[in-house]
Amino acid sequence: MIAIIPSAGLGTRFLPFTKSVPKELVPIMGVPSIQYIIKEACSNDITSFCIVINKQKTALKQYLTIDNALNTELKKKNKLFLVEEINNIIEKCTIQFIDQYAPLGLGHAVLCARELSKYNEPFVCIMLPDELLFDDQHEPTLLKEMHELAQQHTASVIAVKEVPLSQTASYGIIKANSLPNTKNCFLVNQVIEKPNPLQAPSRLAIIGRYVLEKDIFDVLPTVSAGSGGEIQLTDGIAALIDKGKKVIAYQYAGNRFDVGSPQGWLDANIFINNKQKKS
Ligand code: G1P
């Protein structure tokens, strides 16, 4: 599978910092959040990426490109190990960038990647870089499990986790029934983008990992602007359901941090710091 990483957002929750630094480069214990995302994908055997950016994100492009001059200098000082992990990632992965020409929403960003993700695999993976997932011991294998489910059921699979009722207006929320003979799986019959707590059909929020049938690229052009006046990926998933397509929600049991917000960022730093102390 190829993973689309929509990274064209303005990072408004992290302004003024994001005025000049892309939010995907905000460091968590010194490592930019995008690096955790790509590492998670690699642990799930995904090494092809289409990163959707905008003209202001040149620093993100630069971070994901080998810097020969820097490598030479670091080598002289015996400090090449400082960039070893990111260099290895860049060398083993295929990373393509595409511009989202206007900030028209997450659904639109995914649609921008349509051409670049043309290949035979019937599913496309989408990873939102604001959401970092960490299991206590290992890298999360969530995407692999979602891909298996997608193949078994010929369905799209979205990852969900419960959030407090007071937070439903920040997320896509699902309405679903449990899926017989499965663990932690639901058959989704409705998805709503950012409902207020009174209208939320559940507390199960979409947490930024999607393995979708390629039909998503056919329905997204039919979706009109929704929450926030933007073309929403959630509305594209709703259109898949309306078309009679199967959508499964898989409840993630590990730790998740919304690092697009200062509080989530702080929590992620503390979690990683504790993890590093233990190892
Ligand atoms: C996006 C999605 C939303 C999802 C959330 C996860 O919202 O539209 O459905 O629950 O990511 O973080 P955003 O954070 O871009 O407003």
Image (cartoon, rainbow, N blue to C red):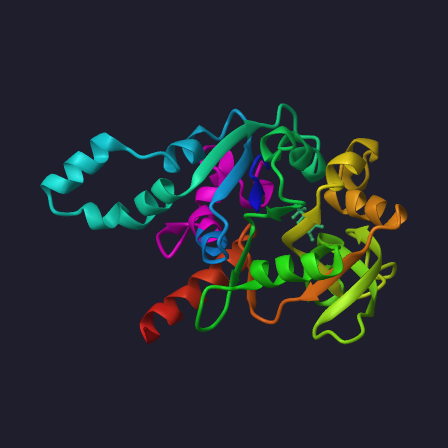
Q: Which residues are magenta?
A: 10-38
Between 84 and 259, which is closer to the camera in this rendering? Answer: 84
Between 249 and 46, which is closer to the camera in this rendering? Answer: 46
**Magenta stretch containing residue 27, yes or no?**
yes
Q: Quadrant of residue 144?
A: bottom right
Q: Quadrant of residue 207?
A: bottom right
Q: Quadrant of residue 220?
A: top right
Q: Where is residue 72? Give x, y as percent.
A: 16, 35
Q: Answer left or right for 63 relative to 219.
A: left
**Magenta stretch containing residue 35, yes or no?**
yes
In this view, which residue lies farthest toward the front? Answer: 120
- Residue name at image x 49 percent, y 32 percent: 96
Q: Is residue 229 visible?
A: no
Query: Where 227 sits versus 54, above or below?
Result: below
Q: Where is residue 69? Give x, y as percent.
A: 21, 30
Count every numbered label the image shows and give the total.
0
Quarter of the image for the C terminus: give it. bottom left
Between 204 and 21, which is closer to the camera in this rendering? Answer: 204
Query: Where 64 sits versus 138, above or below?
Result: above
Query: Where 24 sits versus 96, above or below?
Result: below
Between 151 and 226, which is closer to the camera in this rendering? Answer: 151
- Residue name at image x 65 percent, y 32 percent: 114
Q: Where is residue 126? Give x, y as percent.
A: 62, 46
- Residue name at image x 76 percent, y 41 percent: 215
Q: Is residue 173 visible?
A: yes
Q: Answer left or right for 180 relative to 44.
A: right
- Residue name at image x 34 percent, y 41 percent: 91
Q: Where is residue 119? Give x, y as percent.
A: 60, 36
